[in-house]
Image (cartoon, helix red, strand yellow):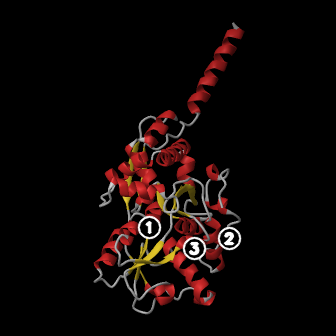
């Protein structure tokens, strides 16, 4: 009888302990992603159309989740959305990630890159026949870019000015830049009558502009960086990743699957882009762009990140010095051959 009482007491104690355990935190049922404009965001379009995030979430045992997209015109606006908590994952320029990483390091959520997204150049085009290179810009000229300060576009121009005019004159052209979304800048440029006659463009706006015989190239960021570099990255807060580890992994897997799909069937990917974005391009036009890996290439591996980081640290745009590109990205990228 004594033995039975002891067994019952142990069972009750075990059940009491079980009920005392806190319930496991439930991961989010919605993933909110913000992007900007252009062909650079094609893996996102494909992942959304084919419901790849939802697929990988279900495979991870998360059940059904909702993916919500929003679109903003500049990296600064994207960062504001991420910091305010109104979005979970941001897609934007590499230098925009570096800036928000630097400011959030040790606080405000600690923000890092989920993965690289797209290698593609920033090309300053101009309709002004007087301008052949950045040496020809003068007071009164206007160069449109997604934001006049702090973006990958503005840093690229500053680095080019440092090479052309000397480090002390690196900001020589900064006062010529004006913030405009890519679609608005392209319209202004091609009108020929707007004060904006130059645009730091990316695909496909770059190709639309260069199709006009009046337009020429004044600067290519691949020349500034010494080769092909990552322009667009995906990034988020450590807090969101920690609270939603399976969801985070599902998004990573979905984006990587989308990139592999694009690289294996670029014509089908071109069709996805035209369904997702309003464009005057034909399927053949977009397919041709995707075939040129010097124009656009999708990869989760960060490329030439430290070229921009070293410059930004040197001139005081970044306070915290990164030892390597891995400092800017979460551990899921660390085994990749980045730079």
- Residue sitting at 62 percent across and 52 percent down? 333
Task: Return the disc, 2 or 1, that comes first in the chain's sequence.
Answer: 1
Disc 2 to disc 1: CB gap under 8 Å = no
SS of the residue at dot 1? loop
Q: Position of residue 29 (x, y in %)?
A: 43, 42
Name the residue carrying label 2: 321
Does residue 184 appear to the left or right of 250 in the view shown? left
Q: Viewer-proximal residue, 203 or 155? A: 203
Which quadrant would the N terminus be assigned to in this image? top right
Tell which residue pokes out farthest to the front in this image. 213
Residue 17 lies in quadrant: top right
**Marks 3 and 2, how far apart in space?**
24 Å
Name the residue carrying label 1: 202
Residue 223 numbered tag: 3
Around disc 3, counting alpha carbons within 10 Å, would you say few (fewer than 14), some (14 to 19), or many (20 or more)? few
Task: Return the disc, 1 or 3, that comes first in the chain's sequence.
Answer: 1
- Residue sitting at 54 percent across and 65 percent down? 94
């Amino acid at each position: 009888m004594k033995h039975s009482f002891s067994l019952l007491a142990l069972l009750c104690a075990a059940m009491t302990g079980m009920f005392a355990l806190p319930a496991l935190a439930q991961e989010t049922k919605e993933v909110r992603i913000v992007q900007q404009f252009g062909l650079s965001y094609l893996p996102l379009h494909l992942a959304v159309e084919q419901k790849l995030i939802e697929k990988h979430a279900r495979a991870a045992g998360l059940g059904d989740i909702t993916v919500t997209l929003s679109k903003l015109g500049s990296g600064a606006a994207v960062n504001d959305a991420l910091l305010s908590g109104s979005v979970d994952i941001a897609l934007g320029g590499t230098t925009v990630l570096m800036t928000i990483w630097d400011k959030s390091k040790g606080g405000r959520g600690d923000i890092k890159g989920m993965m690289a997204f797209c290698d593609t150049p920033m090309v300053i085009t101009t309709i002004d026949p007087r301008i052949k290179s950045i040496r020809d810009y003068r007071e009164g000229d206007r160069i449109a870019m997604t934001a006049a300060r702090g973006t990958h576009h503005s840093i690229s121009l500053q680095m080019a000015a440092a090479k052309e005019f000397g480090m002390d004159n690196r900001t020589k052209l900064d006062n010529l830049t004006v913030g405009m979304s890519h679609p608005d800048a392209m319209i202004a440029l091609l009108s020929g009558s707007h004060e904006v006659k130059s645009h730091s463009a990316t695909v496909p706006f770059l190709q639309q502009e260069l199709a006009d015989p009046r337009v020429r190239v004044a600067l290519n960021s691949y020349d500034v960086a010494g080769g092909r570099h990552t322009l667009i990255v995906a990034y988020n807060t450590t807090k969101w990743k920690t609270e939603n580890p399976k969801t985070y992994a599902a998004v990573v897997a979905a984006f990587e699957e989308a990139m592999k799909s694009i690289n294996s069937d670029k014509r089908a990917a071109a069709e996805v882009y035209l369904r997702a974005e309003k464009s005057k391009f034909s399927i053949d036009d977009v397919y041709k762009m995707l075939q040129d890996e010097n124009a656009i290439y999708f990869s989760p591996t960060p490329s030439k990140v430290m070229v921009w980081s070293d410059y930004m640290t040197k001139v005081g745009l970044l306070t915290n010095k990164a030892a390597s590109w891995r400092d800017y990205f979460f551990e899921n990228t660390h085994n990749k051959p980045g730079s």
